[in-house]
Image (spheres, rainbow, N blue to C red):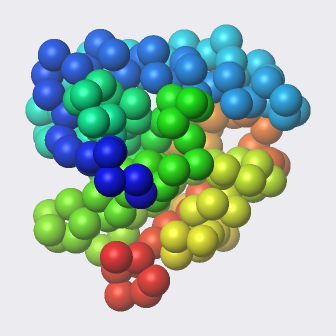
Amino acid sequence: MNSSYKIRSARFEELPLLSHIENSAAALFLDTPYAFLVNDDPLSLDFVQQQFQAERVWVATDRYEIVVGDAIAREVDNALYLQQIDVEPEHGRRGIGSALINTVCAWAKQQGYSIVSLSTFRNIPWNAPFYSKLGFRPLDEAELTTGFQQIRIKELAAGLPISERVVMYCEFQGNCN
């Protein structure tokens, strides 16, 4: 990651900014079969505040301390689940996403989690292929716990094509941090 960027825990006053970053990052889906995601509602501020209270919201800032990316996690079935990760497109491809994930994984390990998980698209380069490079592996559908089955149901209800989605996980004794 370029040294002009820093990753840190979010500040309460920054939380309302994260929906703008999420919406900006969604524009990357315009040239994919999932262009409908551009019009999706961002995570609710209430949800983001809940995760902030649990110390599970991180931001990437530029040299001026302007927030240009974020990661938001929550607990699902004793694993830390990466709910959302976004980087402003004009700051993309500079290692910010990887740095955010490394920070989330380091925090999870400190908190006693052995797994970080996420749900993403199989065939979008900045989704499953990106996470694979960071040590995440697909979880077979038969292995999904109740919490992850509920995530799948919510994704289906939101109109996401489940056949194109994959739940991935990274165990700390493996390649993750």
Q: Residue 115 vs residue 167: left or right? A: left
In this view, 92 is above or below 143 = above
Percent across and percent down for residue 154 are 58, 32
Q: In this view, does 140 lie above or below 54?
A: below
Residue at (51, 50) in percent of width and height:
94
**Is residue 104 placed above or below 88 in the rendered structure?**
below
Residue 52 falls in image quadrant? top left
Q: Answer left or right for 41 relative to 107.
A: right
Percent across and percent down for residue 3 are 32, 53
Q: How many marks?
A: 0
Residue 107 lies, in percent from the top left, at 21, 60
Q: Is residue 152 left or right of residue 94?
A: right
Residue nearest the observer in this picture, 139 or 134: 134
Q: Is 104 placed above or below 60 here?
A: below
Residue 56, visible in the rendered structure: no
Quarter of the N terminus within the rendering: bottom left
